[in-house]
Structure formats: structure tokens, C-alpha cells
Image (cartoon, rainbow, N blue to C red):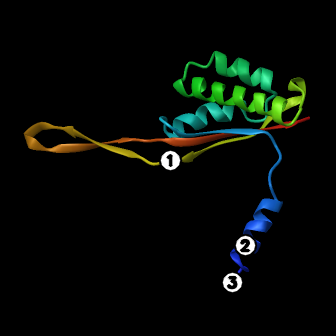
Amino acid sequence: MARGHRSQIKRDRNAQKDTRPSAKVSYARISVQKACFVLDAIRGKDVESALAILEYNPRYASSVVKKLLESAIANAENNNGMNRENLYVEECFANKGPTMKRIRPRAQGRAYRIEKRTSHITVVLNER
């Protein structure tokens, strides 16, 4: 049950810090299911082909993910000193964010709920 003192838990967590370059957008106004269609298309690809896929993908999520991928590439070059030609998309995933609830008036005084879903999208790169 007890895993140790909280300062020790924090120390262990910080020791296992992930050094791969990444970028994250929180509270993106797109549902997880719609974002995953685009993320599945670029997972495992090198960054140049992933950017080309996102450029010509007609879905709205592709514009959000394209900006996120460009940010992750810039993080890799500036913070980690990695070469752009060797980068590829190692991980990309979308987690569920909070849902905004809205009311839509309907016939005979009824009200229907509209759920505006959000997501947290993460892209992690690595070098080959």
C-alpha cells in the first residue's frame, strides 16, 4: 500500500524523465476519435512524409496536428540539437479532455444536451 515518502516518490519520478523531444496541445476543440484518425496516419513515419500527409489531409484535425508536429520538430532542433532529417514520429496519441455541455432547445419545451468534446494531443519524436 505505502510506496514511500512523497518526496522520494517525486525524486524517483524526476529521475526517470523522458528526454525525447515532444509537443503537447491541451484542450484542443476536437474529439479524441476525430484526432485519432489523423494521428494513426502519421505514426511511425519520418517527419517530412508526416508533414506532407498532414498538408493534404482534408480533416480539420490535420491542421492542429501539423502545427503540433512543427512545434515538436523545433523543440528537437533547438533544445536537443537533433538533426531534422533523422527524426521520426515515435508516439502520437490523444487523451480525453473536459467536455463542455451546452443546451439546444427542441420542440414542446424540451432541451437536448450538446457535448462539445476536447482532447489533449501529444506528439513524441525520436532519432533513427
Asked if labels 3 and 2 touch by Cβ distance under 8 angstroms, the answer is: no
Res 100 quadrant in image: top left
Q: Is residue 82 left or right of residue 71?
A: right
Q: Is residue 59 left or right of residue 85?
A: left
Residue 75 percent location from the top left of the image: 77, 33
Between label 1 and label 3, give the one nearer the viewer: 3
Name the residue: 64% across, 15% down.
Answer: 56
Name the residue: 74% across, 32% down.
Answer: 72
Question: Which amino acid, mark 2?
Answer: Ser
Mark-to-mark CA distance, 1 and 3: 30 Å
Quadrant including the N terminus: bottom right
Q: Which residue is mark 3?
A: 2
Q: Is residue 84 left or right of residue 23?
A: right
Q: Which mark is residue 7?
A: 2
Between label 2 and label 3, give the one nearer the viewer: 2
Choose the circle earlier in sequence order: 1 or 3.
3
Residue 117 percent location from the top left of the image: 43, 41
Say above or below: 86 vs 25: above
Name the residue: 79% across, 21% down.
Answer: 48
| Direction bottom: furthest residue | 1
Question: Which amino acid, mark 1?
Answer: Gly
Q: Which residue is mark 1?
A: 97
Helix, strand or loop for disc 1? loop
Residue 127 percent location from the top left of the image: 89, 35
Res 91 quadrant in image: top right
Q: Nearer the viewer, residue 70 or 90?
A: 70
Question: Which amino acid, mark 3?
Answer: Ala
Residue 59 percent location from the top left of the image: 54, 23
Helix, strand or loop for disc 2? helix
